[in-house]
Image (cartoon, coloured by chain):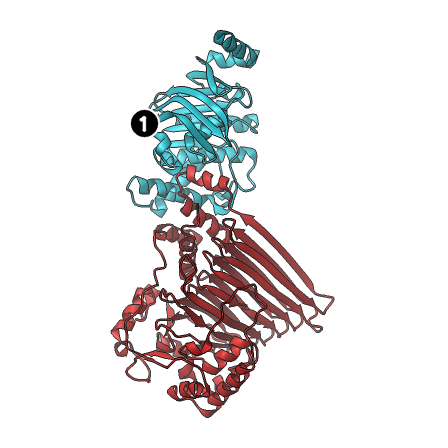
Amino acid sequence: MLRIDNLHACIGGKEILKGINLEVKAGQVHAIMGPNGSGKSTMSNVLVGHPSYEVTAGTVTFKGRNLLEMSPEDRAHEGLFMSFQYPVEIPGVSMTNFMRAALNAKRAYQGLEPVAAADFLKLMKQKREFVGLDAKFMNRSVNEGFSGGEKKRNEIFQMAVLEPSLSILDETDSGLDIDALRIVADGVNRLKSPETSVIVITHYQRLLDYIKPDIVHVLYNGRIIKTAGPELALELEERGYDWVIREFETAGK
Amino acid sequence: MEEGKDNILVRQISEEKYRYGFTTDIQTDIFERGLTEDTVRLISARKDEPEWLLEFRLKAYRQWLTMKMPSWAHLNIPPIDFQNISYYAAPSVKNKGPKSTDEIDPQLMKTFDKLGVPLEERLALSGGMAVDAVMDSVSVKTTFRKNLAEKGVIFCSIGEAVREHPELVRRYLGSVVNYRDNFYAALNSAVFSDGSFVYIPKGVRCPMELSTYFRINASGTGQFERTLIVADDDSYVSYLEGCTAPMRDENQLHAAIVEIVVLDRAEVKYSTVQNWYPGDENGRGGVYNFVTKRGDLRGVNSKLSWTQVETGSAITWKYPSCVLRGDGSQGEFYSVALTNNWQQADTGTKMIHLGRNTSSTIISKGISAGHSQNSYRGLVKVGTEADGARNYSQCDSLLLGSECGAHTFPYMDIHNETAVVEHEATTSKISEDQLFYCNQRGIPTEEAIGLIVNGYAKEVLNKLPMEFAVEAQRLLSLSLENTTG
């Protein structure tokens, strides 16, 4: 699905990623954990092609293609999706119009006709109910005036509509109360299939109680310094990150 | 309803430039360039006008000679040589009588067909819209006249109205916009050519939308159309106006007057989608659009609503206004003005409250991109007698890029202490984060800008009749192509 080799990236001339290696296979759930400022958000932004970040070295292949050569929208069309940590508000643009534009852009990329109005409405209703959002939601402007929970549910709603093959959940648990967290995690779990993969980026173990990772990585200072099974997340929750960092630094000497 | 509009929009957005930029190769009767008293007499003679109208023109011409181009607008207007313009150009028509489809040059039919203007009376397809099609200085055809006549509605070219309803034209022409009003009004009053005349009799609700489509075709000419709409007591009409011109390197002058008279309890909705050729990306060519539009709400509880979507023209100078004379009369102005490349627009409205309990609403949405300059200029005036006058104004500006300008010039002139006047203004930009969010969902940047701009302008676009709303949304998206980067 995704293969990252020796990825280096910087923002504003400052190097943040210093040689990331990661392989995500179809059907897997990977968790990327780490202290603040370790490069977690940079990594997800680089993968989806945010223009503020510059890749200085390394390669990323996605479904066998060079991901770094593709425009952000083509990455989306190829099946890459990011649930944003801070979903942006777009005043005046209704969710209906936004989703139709997104869906039809993908269909155009696949050489398909724009979606028929009736099919579109049916799809919206089905996916909306999937994350428990009411009908009025579709007439509201994208994320405008949404509560923290609504914004994250909206991200999962969009994920459900666009059916990506690889989803990156960037700090999806931040700002969520436990009920909202459950709804969001439940949505992600129900979208999981042997053909799709998920990268969960999180600071805390909490979300991983609901979305069970197959593999857990610790990102520190722009590198992945430890990779293990799901038990690592629990250990990190209990003991913090310091011991992993010490272990890594000792090994380096 | 909304659902339908948007659906069509999304399907229609495609890669295209100014698609009205073609010219029609047709035999045209065109005057020598230049403007003298003889030119005015010649225009009047060509149109077989009565003496009183020639007098009206000549008075205006003499007034114009004493006037100067207004310079107060936030516009940089290159000198205009008024002697280097032809003031009359008529595509050849076989006779001047009532026109039917088969008498029109097939080239003209084709032109309007290509512009998407139905000159055949296809009720179902055109959505029941009657059209007056004007090319250069003359009206080519007016459709659905019989159907309208059954209701007593008069819809024809102003030239024809002068011949067939002289008493109405004489009574109202120049009664809203005096020829002394301003430089361009004087010029128009002297040399005006065709435009539409509408009369809605007492108690009649006009059974279909009326529309005039203005097309400049000949080069080196100006277009000086004149529109007069009279809505008698308890009547209603919705009127639409569309405009396009070929792409040319030269600048072409368009100086129109629209006068609207609204009597007791009558209501008029006037919608414009203005898409004159805006010039190229280096600011070469384009139409100078210097227009005086005004409604006189003479009747009690009368209502006039202006809705305009301005995407075209190199320079726009235009302030559709309401004189709220009748007690309880209501004026509305909804505007989207988009400027790109080197376009300049100074547009807004005047709401003159004279009657008691009059109210007005102003919603203006400016969008500037490229190196363009976009100004809102509005006057809210409340006279001493206008007890209980109310106004609400909202002026928003959206900037795309850092080389363009957005300006707001609201004037208030209040002479009655019971007046309630509110003004709100905002300026915003499309953020990179918004665009990237769209990109990540697979929406390319240009389409994302179109989506955001249409969302921003929604409040105004929703005031337009369905067909126009779709066209306007498409235009907004197209006019912003290549604004990124």
The answer to whether residue B174 is above or below residue B437 is below
- Point 40% across, 83% down: residue: B160
Q: Position of residue A210 (x, y in %)?
A: 48, 21
Chain A in the picture: what colour?
cyan
Q: Which chain carries label 1?
A: A
Q: Where is residue B68 in the image (x, y as percent from the top left)?
A: 56, 76
Identify by letter the chain in red. Answer: B
> Counting other residues with Cα less than 10 Å from the Cα at mark 1, is it few (<14), some (14-19), or many (20 or more)?
some
Q: Is residue B170 left or right of residue B117?
A: right
- Point 37% across, 20% down: residue: A23
The residue that label 1 is drawn on is A63
The answer to whether residue A76 is above or below residue B85 is above
Q: Where is residue B388 in the image (x, y as percent from the top left)?
A: 69, 67
Residue type at mark 1 is Lys
Question: In terms of depth relative to the viewer, which is nearer, B279 or B151?
Answer: B279
**Residue B240 lies in what quarter of the image?**
bottom left
Instruction: Name, please, the residue furthest toward the right.
Output: B417
Residue A74 in sight from this viewpoint: yes
Q: Is residue B80 left or right of residue B72?
A: left
Quadrant containing the N terminus of chain A in the rendered view: top left
Question: In terms of depth relative to the viewer, which is nearer, A10 or B59?
Answer: A10
